[in-house]
Amino acid sequence: MLSDGLQGNSLEKYHSNEPLIRETAEQVIKDFGLFEMVVTFRGDQGTPYDELFGQVLPHIRSLMEHENARLHALMYQIDIPESWWARIRREHSPDAVARGITDAILQRELFKVITRNHYRQRRL
């Protein structure tokens, strides 16, 4: 689903990496907090990625139904590339679009965490 040098399949191997997903959750909590949306992550429900996905998805569904402009602002804040957005919008059902947006957000946030950690380690 994802492009621009970041393939979703290449990040799937990190979905069960609790420390990375915790950092990703912190980034999601920060970004969603800017829009007065609360995401809680305990890391104790199934796989860490699935728990975070389950926390974000209801927010995305609500934004799609009631506040499309706010959804676009959130996507801009998180820096979702337009090419991802275009692919997601081609989905046929609202549920598939909501799941696609949620996945794109989490993949982008995870990529930020991995990149930040990579450069942090290089400085050491």
Image: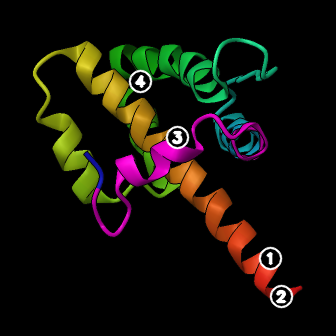
The span from disc 4 to disc 2 (Cα, nearest Å) is 42 Å
The residue pinned by badge 2 equals: 123
Residues at discs 1 and 3 in contact (Cβ within 8 Å) = no
Any part of residue 114 in sight: yes
Compare residues 68 and 30 and report the one nearer the observer: 30
The residue pinned by badge 3 equals: 106
The span picked out in magenta is 3-23
- Say few, some or many: other residues with alpha carbon within 10 Å of mark 1 (under 14 / 14 to 19 / 20 or more): few
Disc 1 is placed on an element classified as: helix
Labels 4, 3: front one: 3
Picture coordinates of residue 42, whole percent (x, y): 82, 20
The residue pinned by badge 1 equals: 120
Q: Is residue 101 left or right of residue 1?
A: right
Labels 1, 3: front one: 1
Disc 2 is placed on an element classified as: helix
Disc 3 is placed on an element classified as: helix
Q: Amino acid at mark 1?
A: Arg
Picture coordinates of residue 77, whole percent (x, y): 54, 53
Q: Give the mark nearer the N terminus: 4 vs 1.
A: 4
* Residue 24 image-quadrant placement: top right
